[in-house]
Structure formats: structure tokens, C-alpha cells
Image (cartoon, rainbow, N blue to C red):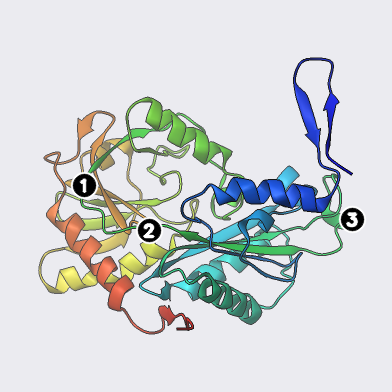
């Protein structure tokens, strides 16, 4: 039966797909016009395998992650054919799932194996691996009690990234930040994060900084923030009420090398007021694909001399070198087939 069109009382007509083959044909037409496939592989526990056809990379509409936001996610990067810090991210992923009261359909070892196999099947040498754990499909109610099982999804995003050397502008966000429970859990409810970025873009800035209810600097919309004080101390806000960034934690492990070189005085976490933070000598975002992004202006006020800081780039070099040639415990080689 050919597709039909249903008139809704106006001149606009909605197409009705009468068969799955007809729908797939339409989807393939859409993806056929894309010059480079941005998502070379996906995994779905609903399908029970790895998907290479972008037209089939979908999740059910009645999945509670879609209509109730009951899901968590995490990420890892693929750099030069290696997965970086996957185990650290997986540990955080499962901690988030526990807080969200979502039981994984697989043990951690199986999740790890699925992600490695999917990344390998993608043939992607540089990009991002992103994965979600959902309460699962089942109905459109609030409670997940009617969902037969949780669901695990993952996708490879083929994107190039490199060390960031140019400074950016930021603003103080007026969008309320999440409470500690939700800020420390990497969940899919990112509307505050989205609005804070849009607010920054409206003002010609790259992104924003959240200040907590006590007046202390918290974090960026999806990254941590760090400072070099006038006394050459590296200071990151404590992780009690914000997400414990895997890259930020690794930075705290690597930065003492600059103390040994006499370039840094100390490395610590600590509270900073807005005024104290704006008085820093250097400032930066810290996140997986950056790994460090220099910040040179905040609310139209220069940070330090308004230029990318020497110590900021030294810290960036430490992290980038770790990503490229760090210990084998952090870099998992992907067994691509030649």
C-alpha cells in the first residue's frame, strides 16, 4: 500500500508511513545526503547489538529517559585509536546510576566490553564516546515500575579536537544552578546547562560560570573551572556540590610536576568568592575534549593581563601529553581490523 497523506484541516498535509520499509527508505534518503557520517556506530540494549546504519540509530519514545529525564550518561574520548580514562568515567557513570536509582542491565565489565567493541566497530580514531543508562522503555508514567528493564545506549561521535590555545570570554550565569544531589549526578536533565550557555552566547561569550548560593565559584555548564592565584597556587572549587570531573581530578594528580619544577607553589581545592576568583592571575575551563580552555575575560573584566597564561598552557601540556602517551592504565588501545 502506498503512503497516504492526512489533511489536518489546513493546507499542511502530514505524511503517513504505511510500512517500515517505506519509513526506512525515507530515512536513508535523509542520511544519504550527509557527506560524512557523524555517528559511525551506536549500541542499543533494546536492539541487543551494535548499529552501523544511521537510519536505525533511534531510541523508543516511551523510554523514561526521553519523556521523564530518568537517565544518566557519561563520556570518554577516542584519541589516536585509544580510549582515554574510560574506567574512571565508567566508575562515575555507575555512581550516577546508583543516585538515580537505575540498575544497569549489565555488570561493569560487560559495559566496558560493549563500549570497546562499539568504538572498534566504528573505526573512529579521534572522537567522543557517549553512553546512557535509562530507566528504560515501557510507558508514559512517572514511576519506572512498569518498565520491564533498564536500557543502555551508546554512540560514537566522529569529531576532531585538539589542544586549545586561544582564550575565551565568559559571564556569570543568572540561571539557577542545580542542587547538590543533581549537580553531583551526571544526569540527562541539562536544561539549566543549556540555558546558561545560550545566555552567554547572547552576550557574545563562550560560556558561563555558576556561583553557588553561598557566593562561591562552582563550575561551568559542562566543565570544571580552575584558577592560578597571584601566589601561583592552582585552585579548583571543591567537588562537594558540583560534578567531580575526571579530567579535573587527573589535573590535580599531574599538576604537582609543576611544583617540582618550581613553577607552581601549591595545588589544592578550595572555595573562592566571585571577587577572589576574578582577581586570579589565570583562569581556565577543564574538561575531557579541551582538556584545558584558557579564559581571558569574565564579565568584560580581564583575568590577569587578559592574555592566555603561561601556567595555564603548562597544565594543558601535562594533560595533553597524558592523553597522547600516558600510562596504559588510562589508555585502552582499540583493536581495529586492518
Q: Disc 1 or 2, which lies upstream in sequence?
A: 1
In the rendered image, the quadrant that contains the C terminus is bottom left
Distance between mark 1 and mark 3 Cα atoms: 50 Å
Element type at mark 1: loop
**Residues under labels 3 and 2: Cα distance?**
38 Å
- Spatial separation of the CA atoms under disc 1 and disc 2: 15 Å
**Whether residue 328 is situated above or below residue 284 in the rendered picture:** below
Quadrant assignment for the N terminus: top right
User: Could you tell me residue 111's position as x and y percent?
Assistant: 63, 75
Q: Nearer the viewer, mark 1 or mark 3?
A: 1
Q: Which mark is residue 289?
A: 2
Q: Is residue 68 visible?
A: no
At x 86% / y 49%, what residue is drawn? 139
Identify the residue at image location x=57%, y=72%. 118
Q: Is residue 73 above or below residue 79?
A: above
Residue at the spot of label 3: 146
Check disc 3: other Cα within 10 Å, few if <14, some if 14-19, many if 20+: some
Q: Is residue 30 left or right of residue 272?
A: right
Q: Residues within 10 Å of mark 2 (few under 14, many from 20)?
A: many
Position of residue 281 measured from the top left corner of the image (x, y, whole percent)? 16, 46
Chain-order first, disc 1 or disc 3: 3
Amino acid at each position: 500500500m502506498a503512503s497516504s497523506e492526512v489533511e489536518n484541516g489546513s493546507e499542511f498535509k502530514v505524511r503517513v508511513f504505511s510500512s517500515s520499509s517505506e519509513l526506512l527508505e525515507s530515512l536513508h534518503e535523509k542520511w544519504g545526503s550527509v557527506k560524512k557520517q557523524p555517528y559511525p556506530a551506536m549500541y542499543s540494549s533494546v536492539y541487543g547489538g551494535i548499529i552501523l546504519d544511521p537510519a536505525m540509530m533511534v531510541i523508543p519514545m516511551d523510554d523514561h529517559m526521553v519523556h521523564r529525564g530518568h537517565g544518566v550518561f557519561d563520556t570518554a574520548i577516542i584519541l589516536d585509536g585509544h580510549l582515554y580514562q574510560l574506567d574512571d568515567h565508567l566508575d562515575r557513570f555507575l555512581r550516577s546510576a546508583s543516585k538515580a536509582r537505575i540498575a544497569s542491565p549489565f555488570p561493569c565489565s560487560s559495559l566496558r566490553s560493549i563500549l570497546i567493541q562499539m568504538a572498534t566497530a566504528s573505526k573512529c580514531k579521534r572522537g567522543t564516546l557517549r553512553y546512557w543508562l535509562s530507566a528504560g522503555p515501557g510507558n508514559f508514567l512517572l514511576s519506572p515500575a512498569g518498565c520491564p528493564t533498564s536500557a543502555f545506549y551508546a554512540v560514537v561521535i566522529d569529531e576532531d579536537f585538539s589542544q586549545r590555545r586561544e582564550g575565551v570570554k565568559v559571564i556569570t550565569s543568572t540561571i539557577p544552578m542545580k542542587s547538590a544531589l543533581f549537580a553531583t549526578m551526571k544526569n540527562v536533565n541539562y536544561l539549566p546547562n543549556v540555558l546558561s550557555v545560550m545566555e552567554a552566547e547572547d552576550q557574545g561569550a563562550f560560556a558561563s560560570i555558576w556561583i553557588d548560593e553561598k557566593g562561591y565559584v562552582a563550575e561551568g555548564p559542562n566543565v570544571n573551572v580552575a584558577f592560578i592565584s597571584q601566589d601561583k597556587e592552582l585552585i579548583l572549587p571543591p567537588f562537594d556540590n558540583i560534578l567531580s570531573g575526571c579530567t579535573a581530578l587527573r589535573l590535580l594528580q599531574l599538576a604537582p610536576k609543576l611544583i617540582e619544577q618550581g613553577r607552581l607553589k601549591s595545588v589544592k581545592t578550595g572555595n573562592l568568592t566571585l571577587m577572589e576568583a576574578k582577581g586570579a592571575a589565570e583562569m581556565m575551563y577543564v574538561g575531557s575534549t579541551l582538556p584545558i580552555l584558557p579564559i581571558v575575560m569574565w564579565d568584560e573584566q580581564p583575568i590577569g593581563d587578559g592574555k592566555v597564561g603561561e601556567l595555564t598552557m603548562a597544565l594543558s601540556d601535562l594533560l595533553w601529553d597524558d592523553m597522547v602517551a600516558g600510562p596504559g592504565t588510562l589508555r585502552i588501545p582499540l583493536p581495529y581490523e586492518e
